[in-house]
Amino acid sequence: MSETPQSADLIVFGGTGDLSMRKLFPALYHCDRDGRLAPETRIIAMSRGGLDDADFRGKVDAEVRGSVPVDDLDTWQRFLDRLHHVSVDISGEDATGWAALTALLAGHEQRSRVFYLASPPMTFGPFCRELHRAGLVTPASRVVLEKPLGRDLASAQRINDEVGAIFDEEQIYRIDHYLGKETVQNLLVLRFANAFLEPIWNSLWIDHVQITVAETVGTPGRRGYYDHAGALRDMVQNHLLQLLCLVAMEPPSRNDRESIRDEKVKVLESLRAITGGEVDRFTVRGQYTAGESGGVQVPGYLDEPDNTAPTDASHRVETFAAIRAEVKNWRWAGVPFYLRTGKRMPDRYSEIVVQFKDVPHSIFPGSTPNRLVLRLQPSEGIKLHIMAKEPGAGEVALKPVPLSLSFAETFTTRVPEAYERLLMDVLTGNPTLFMRRDEVAAAWRWIDPILGAWESYGTAPEPYPAGSSGPAGAHELVSRSDRAWHEEYPA
Ligand SMILES: NC(=O)C1=CN([C@@H]2O[C@H](COP(=O)(O)OP(=O)(O)OC[C@H]3O[C@@H](n4cnc5c(N)ncnc54)[C@H](OP(=O)(O)O)[C@@H]3O)[C@@H](O)[C@H]2O)C=CC1
Ligand SMILES: O=C1O[C@H](COP(=O)(O)O)[C@@H](O)[C@H](O)[C@H]1O
């Protein structure tokens, strides 16, 4: 039975940015369409944009309407009517913006109040200080911090301290939207609600794990953010490491936020540090050049259209990262975890591949090891490739065939986007799928030496053409046996 939604004010700092337009507003529209937002709930966007409410509603209408199924214009209009815009520049002295926000929120202290920081991480501390100074932080308010939290461990700790000076830890929601994806949550169910996997979920039976997040999109219009982030900070420090944690963690004692977070931290702390000369051996970075993606010619990273021209940082930033990681504990010793992510790849897909070892002794020629593939997107599902006999008389011929579970075919309900789930969790005060401060710190502790080494090289990453599967060096990271599988049984 669905609960009656409570009235809320959701204030989105960075409400005109890429994240807001591509993910947050479409998700909020779906929540509204499904009746999960109370009639009085308001969404107040903040940016330097100098827009009034009408301008902002026009912008959302133009940029978001095409990406959501607007089958009913009244519902779309109701959604637009919830939107407001307040201009503020956090890097300058700007009293008018804060006065306007204060006026808008006055008299609504009883509502659930959520401040969503969808702006560059360095603005998080200043925004929180200004909110406090304006007296807008009520005991019941919550703050959402987008990833990546900082640029390294030191800046993450500083931001956490700054935000922690204004909000209690229970009020802070550190988001990683991959944790809101259905298949990611299903990974926990697969591992801990099925008995057959646990006995073989270790280095005795598993050869290696591949975690891949491939995107076809480039970074047009995002130079300001991306030049200072890169794939390692933007994707690996958070999304890919969270996925690795869920694959590698020990069974938590309960399905509650602290038990799960405790186990994830243990995994992060067990990651074998990659330092000094090992960085060259175990990591690869690349940057896309012009090529063909999705059937059209696209520019290279340095020529992406943007308001700002490329700088030295643009030349050095990676749009592709691959790492051979290892979890040094009893369960996983010696099992490589290959992490890979890149922009302008040939296809968009995110998946976790668990590659089992071969049978101890094969009596059939042509047998290949089992593999479990968890597809996070698109077409979420789980496939277990097993060996089967090809029908027919004569010599036994083997073929790997998938036992396949497609969520779309098995469950008829719409699979919600991760941000829908997570935004509703914040609005209703459920922090289970959000990250704890020590998790973020442990992830940075492992990433920092890699970043440090890459920055010390002072050289450009390996180029790869848009639409290719990354720089040549990335393929060398994967052992010969892993490659053999790809060659024989492409996804
Ligand atoms: N884009 C994505 O897919 C994802 C992004 N994120 C995170 O979300 C955050 C935003 O990313 P993204 O949307 O891509 O970035 P954009 O550069 O597209 O947007 C940044 C937003 O912040 C506002 N902003 C920037 N500086 C200031 C300032 N000094 N004062 C007030 N507002 C400011 C901008 O508005 P204006 O310029 O008009 O002032 C804009 O609305 C980052 O922390 C990123 O890591 C997380 C997950 C996915
Ligand atoms: O956090 C981010 O994620 C998106 C990819 O998210 P997905 O849900 O579409 O897989 C990525 O494009 C962006 O650069 C990054 O900041």
Image (spheres, rainbow, N blue to C red):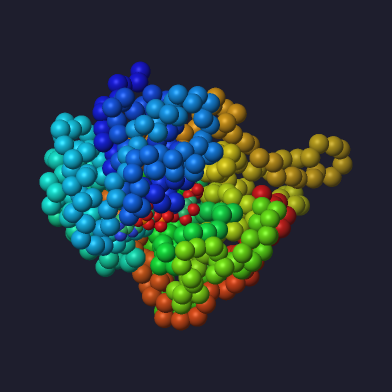
In the rendering, at what x and y percent does residue 150 appear? 32, 62
In the rendering, at what x and y percent does residue 402 appear? 66, 40
Residue 112 located left or right of residue 55:
left
Residue 258 located left or right of residue 99:
right
Residue at the image point whose x is 43% and y is 29% from the top: 77
Residue at the image point whose x is 55% and y is 58% from the top: 218
Rendered view: 108 above or below 304: above
Residue at the image point whose x is 63% and y is 37% from the top: 403
Residue 92 located left or right of residue 80:
left
| Furthest-right residue in this view | 394
Residue at the image point whose x is 47% and y is 38% from the top: 61
In the rendering, at what x and y percent does residue 459 appear? 50, 80
Q: Is residue 172 visible?
A: yes
Rendered view: 57 above or below 207: above
In the rendering, at what x and y percent does residue 28 appear? 40, 35
The residue nearer to you, when weighing 64 against 209, is: 64
Q: Quadrant of the N terminus?
A: top left
Residue 294 located left or right of residue 170:
right
User: How many numbered tags mark residues here?
Assistant: 0
